[in-house]
Image (cartoon, rainbow, N blue to C red):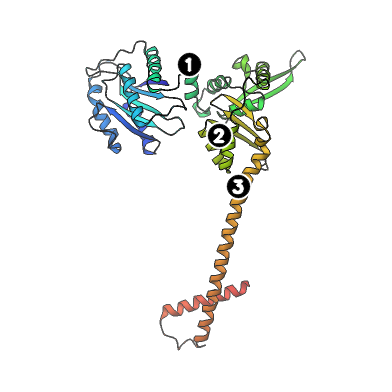
Amino acid sequence: MVAKINRGASIYGALIYNQEKVNTGNARIISGNRMMVDVTANPENVMQQTLFSFEPLLAANRNTRQPILHISLNPTNHDHLNDEQFASLAKDYMEKMNYGNQPYIVYIHEDIDRRHIHIVSLCIDDEGRKIDDAYEHRRSMTACRELETKYGLEKITDERKETDRLFLQKVDYQKGDVKHQISNVLKYALDYKFTTFGEYSALLSLFNVESKTVNGVGVNGKPFNGIVYSATDDMGKAVSNPFKSSLFGKAFGHEKLNKKMERNAKDLKEGKYAPLIRGDISSVMKTEKDKEDFMRKLREKGIDAVFRTNDEGRLYGATFIDHNRKEVYNGSQLGKDFSANVFHKLFNESQNRDSSDKNDSNEKHINHENHNQNNISDIGGLFDLFTPNSGNDITEDIAEQDLIRRLRKKKRKQQRHL
């Protein structure tokens, strides 16, 4: 489990962040401590109730500039706790961090496949004094290790890497500092096993980073190979200037990456590691024939699929990223049953069936309309039989006369189209 502790000056900002997720159904309130009312029973008024509960301490605050605590506790994807266990986990953590007597509210977030909790509280006591936070990071790590044992959670051996993995986000060009954002992604990607540059590029594309090889001739006349990285939008289109790999370090350049890929290919061939995701992919292929549903179902298993299509819509490449084992494979590398052609047929057959079903539905609709048109023709004929040419012997009911005129007009229109 990884804990992330943030401090702030605005209680409103911390609460609105969580409340917006509650309002959209992506989060729920599961517990509270020293709150004026049961916050789980009245979520629509929780903002006001929480502010009232925190107000006495905030009013007593002496000189703490950032009195708001916003903590997230993040078990791994393999850990499965229910609401009661999560609430107990939050209580134990707060007590271990000396915040057990503080007012706080606990939210469970379910907007991603990794369920986790957020705790909003205060780091000042009833007298307005700041609670001692000396060696907080070290104490938090100790608390997490102890709670992993108590709740049977997966042990975290490298907290820095796990933190990078949990909180790594797609590069967002609008946020600025693009070079730093790309650097974070590259460092994270280097922990994965991949044997081709295409697999490496597919992995980076998940985080809105494009990698390209560049070839040329140096000032000494010798040919050189290099790599440049750019930020992209969610459609894969580059939105930043390219950055040379040398700006990020030798590990991300052509020479070092080639050595890494050669080493991984050798290990794969010798059986030092193996693609164990075949079974997961096969099981999803049996139930999901739609491309988007297929990718979503795989993602629930911790696997991303990256498909490449040409301008004509032909699927020509498939790459699978196993985040559980940090391995990347081209479809053809997994076997002929996972090649791009197989998936092209799988997804197209699904589309063709949908199209066929739609055509059948349209045909039934047309036949139904034809049947109705025949009935209208019969009605029109009956009016012709019982309506004198002068039109004066029929009842003076205007609505009836109007109906007759409309039916005759529709009948003539139909006959013109025959």
Instruction: Give the labeled residue for mark 2.
Output: 234
Q: Which mark is residue 350?
A: 3
Name the image quarter holding the N terminus: top left
Q: Quadrant of residue 378?
A: bottom right
148 vs 311, left or right, is: left
Residue 163 sits above or below residue 365 on the image: above
Q: According to the image, label 1 marks what residue?
A: 157
Dot 1 falls on a residue whose secondary structure is loop
User: Which badge, 2 or 1, is on the more N-terminal residue?
Assistant: 1
**Quadrant, the C terminus:** bottom right
- Residue 117: x %, y % from top left: 38, 28
Q: Is residue 231 visible?
A: no
Q: Is residue 104 left or right of residue 112?
A: left
Closer to the camera in the image, 182 or 89: 89
User: Total number of numbered labels?
Assistant: 3
Whether residue 295 sits left or right of residue 315 in the image: it is: left
